[in-house]
Image (cartoon, rainbow, N blue to C red):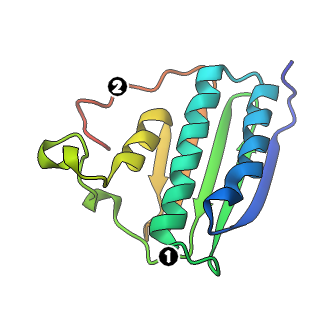
Amino acid sequence: MASETPIQATVVLESKPSSLVEPCRQILSALEEKGFTQDDVFAVHLALEEAFLNAVKHGNKMDRSKKVTLEYAIDDEKVEIKMADEGQGFNPQDIPDPRAGDNLYRPEGRGLLLIRAYMHLARYGSNGTSLRMVRYKNKPVPDRSEVGLA
């Protein structure tokens, strides 16, 4: 049975892919504790891993002296995840749609597409070094195929 007490934490992680293992396990366990469906757990897992790998690889350029800050809050209705890297930032609008034309054969943009496809809200900070993602319990993600990546 879900409890009404929110589960929340802030962790500062090394810029290496394996740093996410334990916080990810904690987040997914908390989602199950709060009664999220397996579809919700899968969606958050995928988006969390994609966002973290983007922060480590593209944001911090695999520089282990740089950190990724991960904040999360999980209540009975939603999970909210905030992530920030120490990179130079980017403009998400500059990333080409990986579903269009020659972009089908290029690796850029797939992580952003997956994050936006699986989360109900995905917003980048104005400088592109932070991301806020939200997924609501048992709420289908709207079909965004007609509106592109936005």
Q: What x and y, as percent, mark residue 112?
A: 40, 49
Residue lying at 46% horizontally and 52% vertically, measured from the top left: 123
Q: What x and y, as percent, mark residue 104?
A: 21, 43
Left or right of 143 on screen, residue 60 = right
What element does badge 1 sit on? loop
Which residue occupies the extreme bottom position in the image?
65
Is the residue under label 1 in contact with that under label 2 (CB below 8 Å)? Answer: no
Q: Is residue 145 visible?
A: yes
The residue carrying mark 2 is 143
Mark 1 closeness class: few <14, some 14–19, many ≥20 residues within 10 Å = many
Relative to 132, residue 120 above or below: above
Residue 136 found in image quarter? top right
Q: Is residue 133 visible?
A: no
Quarter of the picture holding the N terminus:
top right
**Amino acid at dot 2:** Asp
Residue lying at 74% horizontally and 32% vertically, measured from the top left: 31
Left or right of 106 on screen, residue 39 = right
**Amino acid at dot 1:** Gly
Left or right of 93 on screen, residue 71 = right
Relative to 114, residue 41 above or below: above
Q: CA distance from mark 2 to mark 1?
A: 32 Å
Q: What x and y, as percent, mark residue 34?
A: 79, 27
The residue carrying mark 1 is 87
Q: What x and y, as percent, mark residue 76?
A: 75, 28
Relative to 117, residue 49 above or below: below
Residue lying at 25% horizontally and 39% vertically, measured from the top left: 148
Quarter of the picture holding the C terminus:
top left
Residue 37 found in image quarter? top right
Q: Upstream in the sequence, badge 2 or badge 1?
A: 1
Residue lying at 42% horizontally and 48% vertically, measured from the top left: 111
What element does badge 2 sit on? loop
Nearest-to-viewer mark from 2 and 1? 1
